[in-house]
Image (spheres, grey):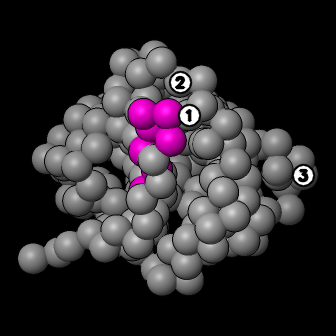
Amino acid sequence: MEVLEVLKVIEFDGKVVKIIKGDITIENTDAIVNAANSHLKHGGGVAGAIVRRGGKIIQEESDKIGYIPTGSAAITTAGNLNAKYVIHTVGPVWGEGDENNKLKNAVKNALLLAEEHKLNSISLPAISSGIFGFPKERAVDIIFDTALEFLKDSKFVKEIHFCNIDLQTSNLFLDKSNKF
């Protein structure tokens, strides 16, 4: 049986942040975030894992949405996953220009969709830091800071998980959280 390893829990003002090492597809949050491409074709990486575990309904719903630009987000049901929804957000490919702002917008728009759907908990991977080539440490800084800033004023979202399958990325989130 697969397990999620909680590396750290931060609580403040009735809100919770967790740093988790493990497979985001087994998270039991209201939504998990998929690091998607603009065409919402979920073949590899986190996206492929989400569809393999959650079922083809996720890809079918994504196909109905079609295209979303970099920095934007869309929501589908989660099929057979523990989560209720998958929020697909498109981070930048490293080298395309204005990557920091595009990544910040991708995170913020994913969180805004969660808020709009009155979701209480969400799990985020290190968007753009895999096959899109965004430097991991820089991505973690932007993702963590953007999510915490959002969480401070959030009405519905009360819990954010930073969930990554690899130890290196999990440790970067852990190091970042130690500065919080």
Is the residue marked by circle 3 packed among few (<14), some (14-19), or many (20+) residues within 10 Å?
few
How far apart in space, not on screen, are marks 1 and 3 (Cα)? 27 Å
User: Please, what secondary structure does the residue beneath circle 2 have?
Assistant: loop
* Disc 1 to disc 2: CB gap under 8 Å: yes
Q: Residue furthest right?
A: 97
- Vertical side of 49 occupied by 66: above or below: above
User: Which one is in front, 10 or 114?
Assistant: 10
Chain-order first, disc 3 or disc 2: 3
Q: Name which residue lies at 20% across and 73% down.
A: 3
- Residue with the mark numbered 2: 154
Please identify the quadrant where the C terminus is shown.
bottom right
Please identify the quadrant where the N terminus is shown.
bottom left
Query: Is residue 85 among what the camera can see?
Result: yes
- Residue with the mark numbered 1: 151
Q: Name which residue lies at 72% across and 71% down.
A: 137
Q: Quadrant of residue 57?
A: top left
Query: Which numbered disc, 1 or 3, marks the residue closer to the eye?
Result: 1
User: Which one is in front, 54 or 19?
Assistant: 19
**What type is the residue that disc 1 sits on?**
Leu
Report the disc number at residue 97.
3
The verdict on residue 74 being magenta is no
Is residue 115 rendered to the left or right of residue 180? left
Q: Residue furthest left?
A: 1
User: Please, what secondary structure does the residue beneath circle 1 have?
Assistant: helix
Residue 81 picture location, percent across and down: 19, 49
**What type is the residue that disc 2 sits on?**
Ser
Q: Quadrant of residue 102?
A: top right
**What type is the residue that disc 3 sits on?**
Gly
Is the residue marked by circle 2 packed among few (<14), some (14-19), or many (20+) residues within 10 Å?
some
Magenta span dominant secondary structure: strand
